[in-house]
Amino acid sequence: MLTEHENKIIGMIYDAALNPLLWQDVMAEVVNFTTSTTAIFTATDQLSPNYDFVFTHNIPEESMRAYQEEQLKVIDMRLHAPYWSAKPLGGTVINSFAPYALMPVDSDEFVFYEKCAKPTNIIHVAAVLLERSAYSWAVFAVHRAPHLEEYSEQEEKILKRLGVHLRRALQIYRQIAILQQEKKNIYHVLDHFNVGVMLINQDYQLCYANSIVKKIVEHSCILELDKKNHLKTLKTFQDKLNQLIHSALFEHEKINNEAGGVLAIYDQDNNSLMLSILPFLPSQTQPAHKQAIVFVTQTNQPHHLAKDYLIQKYKLAKREISVCELFVNGLNLEQIAQHMQITYGTIRIYMKNIFAKTGCASQAELMQLLMGLTLEFEHIH
């Protein structure tokens, strides 16, 4: 049976879901109820950073400033996510930060200890998991100073019971935040695009991603986010990606160059994505807030080339276009020869002619060119 104090906290949780200013009171009550030193309620979503929040009790401003500005909240998420791997939503973990102080000085563990745990004088932690994915989580945690006892199984059960209501409150909070966003910005429109869309700010950080691109990035092995919310891809394509984003953000610096462009990224296992990067100005009244908009499309479905364009632009013959279409769909030269029922030597002649007409010097360069000429999405050049 729940205690009177616990019932009081549950009521306060739902009040805070509607009025975020009340989370400070909730945190204080939970700290008192569990005889803790500090508490934190944090939600981190790298793909929707506008919905991030952190509520704390008794944590020094120095620690919170580092947590926010130095992206320790992402280190926190990635560092502690393994502890939750075998836990369901609503599961709890009891841990200690003490071993972190003995780790190498450049490790995430040591940095987290020095910037967050040590200034706050906390070691013991008990936490409940409220949300989790590759790039997001929400956790409610309480902490104790080194001289206090570790958390007990009974206190873990209390936190688990409160977690049920914290999860519901979080869902209410999210819905209210979404409704408020839809009323005042362009994100509501972008949410309904049929392709993946993300926005990059002038610090090169992802600041918005719609639901389609969230699914793509969550499951992608060739496109991800680092702890600073910068887009990262395979080393082969990273410089080009950075260049296109820069040109879209700072097009006025370019002379005789178009802003943005198209980039196909792919690995040796034929996992591939197409990125179209363009300048984006959310408001004509705030030109200083220019962003880069990135359209992301999956290209692991059969590709169909813009044949008329290949004929007009590069003067390719029909058989050469057939070779290109098989090539862009992942077949090697031997497989193309077998599919077209011609010799390997003939295929090599076709490829030599294609290289000459397109100006490509390698198969990788030809692949990148052709990926920009598929019909699955109308990329802008």
Image (cartoon, rainbow, N blue to C red):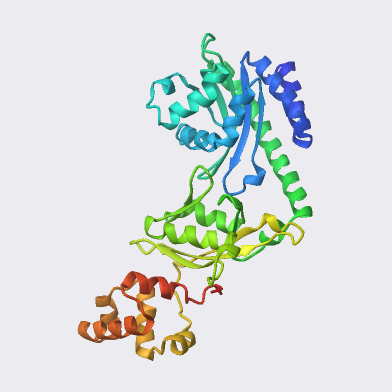
Q: What residue is rendered at 44% in x and 28% in y?
A: 109
Quick one: quadrant of the N terminus?
A: top right
Q: What residue is rendered at 41% in x and 70% in y?
A: 368
Q: In this view, does 162 lie above or below 285?
A: above
Closer-to-camera residue (137/294): 294
**Residue 122: percent from left, percent from top:** 54, 17
Is residue 41 visible to us here? yes
**Residue 132: percent from left, percent from top:** 55, 40
Q: In this view, does 62 lie above or below 321?
A: above
Q: What residue is rendered at 71% in x and 16% in y?
A: 3
Horizontal arrangement in the rendering, residue 1 relative to residue 157 (left or right): right
Horizontal arrangement in the rendering, residue 280 relative to residue 72 (left or right): right
Closer-to-camera residue (136/229): 229
Q: Where on the picture, by quarter, is residue 137?
A: top right
**Residue 172: percent from left, percent from top:** 73, 41
Label count reads: 0
Closer-to-camera residue (7/304): 304
**Residue 234: percent from left, percent from top:** 39, 56
